[in-house]
Image (cartoon, rainbow, N blue to C red):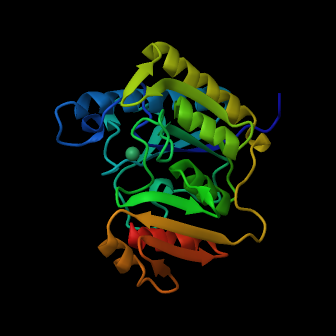
Amino acid sequence: MAEKVAKTVFISADMEGVSSLAASEEVSKGESDYEEFCKLMTGDVNAAVEGALEAGAGRVVVRDAHATARNILPAELHPRAELIRGWTGRPLSMMDGIDEGFDLVLFVGYHSGPGLEGGTLAHAMSGKFHEIHLNDRPASEAYLNALTAGYYKVPVGFISGDDVCCQQAQELIPGIETAVVKYGRGQAVHSLPLEEARQRIREGASRAVKNPDCFKLLGQGNEKFSLSLSYRRMKDAIRAGNYPGARQKNYLVEFSSQDYLEVLTFLHFVS
Ligand SMILES: [Zn+2]
């Protein structure tokens, strides 16, 4: 067992990959199914918080990262977890609140990038995009957000969601701890018993917090970040093409920088 435990932990929590969740009504405020799934989301997040605290973390900050960023139920959240709700308007998006002071990032309730049959409610950042590629690789939210963590020199050590999302994350960060809570089947999901799903989250988060040094930091070195957005609508593509430094051709808009924060700022303005 490693001696160095992650003391300060940042959790970015999305909703599509929450245990047993299957449909878009369940992640949309105002729909009658939604409240029930806020409880389930809070329960999955609590399992990760428990795992982190059990492993020796002293501080856990949870970033609600889905849609309005007001989905987690504060009164039901683990009493030792801090919660960031709502959007500041800054470009860090689903990672807003992270800084160099954190030792480890955990992703809870995540989903895969678009275009994969088993990916439950799979998409990339915004409904405006058909696909996003970064350096010629399909860019899932986990990929973009792990680069944000890497920008602040914080590794990502855990992800929960469906099987496709967890597999994508393993290709990105070898050895990342994963908790598969459900299997995507077209528009259906095959879920684990809820207690077992939560146990997987608790145990995976705990293992990651005990070994924060074994996860690769993404985006290190002098690589250039080239983002390519494939829009669904021409007028959105043309509008985005006006961003300083962006290049647009038909539905495709590209932007490159050696500074990942500049790429995030571009994405923030054109999403
Ligand atoms: Zn979401």
Quarter of the rendered structure image containing ligand 1: top left
**What residue occupies the far front of the structure in this picture?**
250
Give left or right: position of 3 versus 32: right
Residue that appears at 57% across and 21% down: 200
Q: Quadrant of the C terminus?
A: bottom left
Q: Quadrant of residue 257?
A: bottom right
The x, y position of residue 21, in whole percent, is 36, 29
Q: Taking the image as drawn, is residue 94 in sight? A: yes
Q: Residue at x 32, y 36 (%)?
A: 73
Q: Position of residue 6 (x, y in %)?
A: 69, 41
In the rendered view, would you say 238 is above or below 23? below
177 or 225: nearer the eye?
A: 225
Left or right placement of residue 176 versus residue 117 in this view? right
Quarter of the image where the N terminus is located: top right
Please state which of residues 44 and 20 is positioned toward the viewer in this rendering.
Answer: 20
Q: Is residue 207 above or below residue 225?
A: above
Q: How many marks?
A: 0
Q: Is residue 36 above or below residue 153?
A: above
Location of residue 36 in the rendering, given as x and y in whole percent from the top left corner: 26, 27
- Above or below: residue 251 compared with residue 1: below
Judge by depth and name the residue closer to the eye, 69 or 76.
Answer: 69
Q: Can residue 205 be seen by looking at this rendering?
A: no
Residue 158 on image: x %, y %: 62, 37
